[in-house]
Image (tube, rainbow, N blue to C red):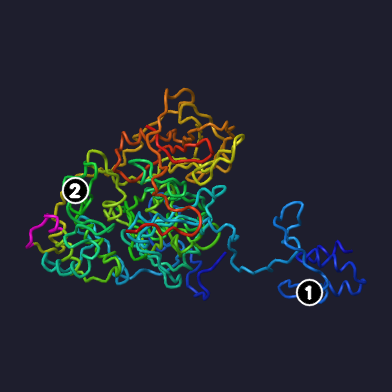
Amino acid sequence: MLGKLRRLSQGVSEIALEESERLPSAERRRFLRSGLFTAGGAMVGGALAGIAPKALAATQYPPEIPSWTRSLGPGVVADPYGVPSPFEKDVIRRNVPWLTADKVSSISFSPLQHLKGIITPNGLFFERHHAGRPEIDPQQHRLMIHGLVDRPIILSMEDLQRFPSVSQINFIECPANGGMEWRGAQLNSLQFLHGMVSCAEWTGVRLSTLLQEAGIQPKGKWLLAEGADGAAMTRSIPLEKALDDVIVAYAQNGEALRREQGYPIRLVVPGWEGNTHVKWLRRLEVGDKPWMQREETSKYTDLMPDGTAHGFTWVMEAKSVITSPCPEMPVRGKGICQIEGLAWSGRGKVRAVDVSVDGGKNWQQAQLREPVMSKSLTRFSLEWKWDGNPALLQSRVIDETGYVQPTLGQLKAARGTNSIYHKNAIQTWKVNADGSVVNVQLS
Amino acid sequence: MFSFLKSSRALPGICLGVALVSAPMTGVAEPAGHYGYGASATEEQIAAWDIDVRPDGMGLPEGSGSVDEGMQVYETYCSSCHGAFGEGMGRYPKLAGGDGSLAEDRPEKTVGSYWPYASTLWDYIHRAMPFFAPQSLTDDQVYALTAYVLNLNYIVESDFVANKETLPEVVMPNQDGFTWEDPRPVVSNERCMKDCKESVTVSDSAAGKNLTPSTTGPLDEGITE
């Protein structure tokens, strides 16, 4: 009987139940009921008055019985929208103050060193704003589709949700991810070196559905996407891509987009540089030529050593990085160490990842963790027995096109050191004898 | 599933299922207007939001502005961040100079040295500047600023007047400096597994450089100079 009551009264403390066992059965039932119906699970003062609280032990692990096992916790909806444990307070997005003039036009980095699996929690998805994060009332927000279309339309957010929806898991990476490291090793942190990549399940309407609804005219070859933020951020996208796998997303990991990610709607342009995934999307124009906007001429073009530049370099090429160990996650002693990391490619699926512990002299194939999806983050792992000697850890991804992630030397030989964007070179972590990990570059 | 709207407007034609347009795109599953959702965009609505300008001048409005007029506007709204002569302030962008520097060790990518099209200047100032009050300038002010910044870069003479006819005629110094076809993949690596190189040398390390903000505790405000 007590067992049943225990199940019924989940949340009533062990102390209360023990105390109740000393009571006659009728009183015991009343006692338990009073405990169950006390708002917030507060202690029942009268019945417990005789129990002296045990002095709190210095530790809570065996042989101690933890205090949280002998008390009640907050009830349901204590956090109507759940938040992480206060013990996770260090797991936050962070910025590099010296990098930009202002936080309004800046970036923040995802704490990759703390993340598990392949999905980035919505509150930790990296941010890139050009004019801050607008506060948009979805009832007042509209998406206009016009230009070389038969039927220019204006859609409310309610209209958008009536179209057939799709969900797909895709990474988004800023093409400047790692861009501070072309000339040398500067930052000693996984978060700041590679944290401008995140991955989510996006839900929305296929862009092809919306463009077909508007009716693309035969001369239409390009699309201009424009945001509703104070930068009215724009990018030209060829229709071939727009009609392929692009979506107008209104949800991220099952809930409405976060404001930082473009609430109420954004473009998701799988595998392409983050800047094309226009947030706070308000307008799509079909045209016959690209618009040569600031974000595709002055910015997001790659300067080569001869002074010429490459534009429209949209695809994020294959990249991988070991996320543990890393500068924030040192090796915890000799013996078996689980090397883990993330790999991705804007051209499709990850085919394989190799890991080296000797700076690229020898490589072993790592295990890919399911699921392995196109244009998504993929997690890999390799068991390594560390002998306590300094080591140079690297990972190298091969994508489904056969492309092999280059070394920094190979990339610099082809691109020089002034291109800022698209630095997808192999990362080297030096493991010191004390287990600490440092960002290094090899000659 | 969440809903954006508490109130739901009853829209006629929800399940119309009727093709409204007779010229569907080839290879398209559904004809235009298949769903019939939303409202037709009126010319007035489109005109108000269609602010983009292309290199061929498409999108440029009526109006004009001179270099001298631009100087007045620039000193009021722009020089506090971009400097009196477009030299930039702190980390705010430099607008002028840097000619011939693109192949140098420290290239300076400015409107004059890097930007391939003058139309982009008009478009960007109009949509996003001044930084603290975007889309607050008149079309004439934007023309004037465009003329002034071009003149700061010695691309137009001081008597230049920018308007929808003159601006598309301006040839930027670096117009031919870009390749608009992605050449990648250009860097190829081999998937060598054993004895891939003889020696390994660490050439640089981030240790001790003191450039990394804190990765624990509260946000590091750091040195912002």
Left or right position of A148 against B222: left
Left or right position of B157 against A351: left
Q: Which residue is mark 2?
A: B175
Inspect the image, locate mark 1, and give the three-letter code of the amino acid beneath it: Val
Residue A221 vertical placement versus B50 (above, below): above
Q: State the SS at label 2.
A: helix
Secondary structure that dominates the magenta span: loop
Residues at discs 2 and 1 in contact (Cβ within 8 Å): no
- x, y (%) of residue B63? 16, 69
Label 2 Cα neighbours within 10 Å, binned few <14 / some 14-19 / many ≥20 = few
- x, y (%) of residue A425? 40, 38
Magenta residue span: B150-159
Residue A108 vertical placement versus B199 (above, below): below
Residue ranking furthest to the right = A24
Question: Label for residue A44?
Answer: 1
Number of numbered labels in the structure image: 2
Inspect the image, locate mark 2, and give the three-letter code of the amino acid beneath it: Gln
- Pick the quarter of the image with the C terminus of chain A: top left
Q: Chain of mark 2?
A: B
Q: State the SS at label 1.
A: loop
Left or right position of A93 against A384: left
- Pick the quarter of the image with the N terminus of chain A: bottom right
- x, y (%) of residue A45? 78, 75
